[in-house]
Image: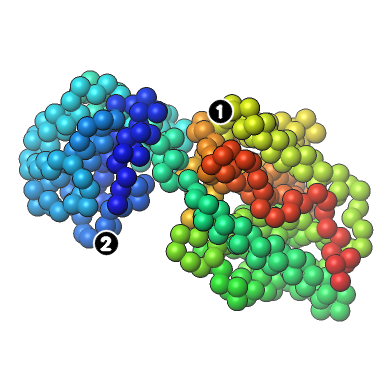
Amino acid sequence: MVDIKKIQDAIKAQGFDGWLFYDFHGRDAIAARILQMDTRRFSTRRWYYYIPAQGTPQKLVHKIEQWRCENLPGDHNVYLPWQEMQSQLKKILGDAKTIAMQYSPNNSIPYISVVDAGTVELIRSFGVEVASSADLVSIFESHLSPADIESHIAAGEVMQMVKDSAFKEIARRIKAGDNPTEYEIYEFMLDIMHKNNMKCEDGPIVAVNEHAGDPHFEPTKENSHKIKDGDLILLDLWAKKNLPGAIYYDITWMGYAGETVPNDIEALFGIIRDARLTAFEMIKKAFASGTEIHGWEVDDACRNVVAKAGYGEYFIHRTGHNIAEECHGNGAHIDNLETKDDRKILPGTCFSLEPGIYMPEKFLGFRTEMDVYITDAGEVKVAGPMQEHVIPIYTLI
């Protein structure tokens, strides 16, 4: 059951007069999840659900789809012609001055920008300002319970094992003169995941040399290289337990096919390791002092380390993303490159930190990725080990 009081408390804390949910033809999956709507039923008419900061929620549904919102508490309002829809909507909003909707000014956070411009114009024509529901969505979409965090940790134990096994398998096969392809190691990793009841929609990534310089390289039988002595190896793997409500775990580790790692390789990896640590320490300091911190600020701090080392142009993606039941969740991303993510990093959330340097023209690509979760008490933690150096994989066997 939807906890209306909890939503109203969050609306008040954000300083809004209410939160207006609106959908047409199932466009707003966020609304469907937060309001626990039955998305299996055929729906073709506009509906609204308004939760005021205080008072009784209001439903507004079309006459031929009066069942819509039947799972939700509140007064039931029905419209037929569009003129009635508009007049009733204006009445429902009453004397509200500012309401939240799934909207983002200038589309700065496209993950939240679901409501169409015309609907925003309509609401504003009533004298009501529309603000972004971004932080409200984070509260209700990305907050993890202690059980959720345990599922993340459990997934991590498997994924760390898969990563270790893959590096060992690569080393074993090279030394045996049976050099594996990237795709063969991809299949090897997937097999272990499935045997350990893990679920992932795609991936993992197994990439060597110039392929590691492509952040989204996808190994196939046709495009894969054989992995050989002296190759730089990137493994990016993400999955969750194949159980309802399970939380993803997502990591990237680097290895080198040799007994020792060349100094230039280790030096480049050290830049992104230090960038990752800078971001992590910034978050820890903010929570320890009770200071609000936003995704874009952490991205800036991480990116500055790479830029000062002279490799800023080669760091071509955001620093990290929210993690929840989906690998890319609906909380704050660590981003001031692809978007300016001004959502607050909240207690009870999980996200990746994954700076990279990509130089395919030099047959190089680096990424280091770990997952950070924050308890409700504000403790900033990492599940599993944090990579400090490129692994010389021949030493593993």
Sooner in the amino-acid sequence: mark 2 or mark 1: 2
Which numbered circle lies on residue 114?
A: none
Check the picture and name the quadrant holding the C terminus: bottom right
Q: Where residue 5 sits: x, y (%)?
A: 31, 39
Q: Give the side of residue 393 with respect to residue 68, left or right.
A: right
Q: Is residue 66 above or below residue 277?
A: below
Q: Quadrant of residue 239?
A: bottom right
Amino acid type, callout 2: Arg
Marker disc for residue 40? 2
Name the side, left or right, on which 239 lies relative to 66: right
Q: Is residue 42 left or right of residue 340?
A: left
Q: Are marks 2 and 1 in contact (CB under 8 Å)?
A: no
Q: Given the image, on which type of amino acid does mark 1 rest? A: Glu
Above or below — where is 143 with respect to 325?
A: above
Of residues 121 and 141, which is closer to you in this image? 141
Residue at 22% across, 32% down: 55
- In the rendered image, which residue does mark 1 sit on? 292
SS type, badge 1: loop
- What number of labels is visible? 2
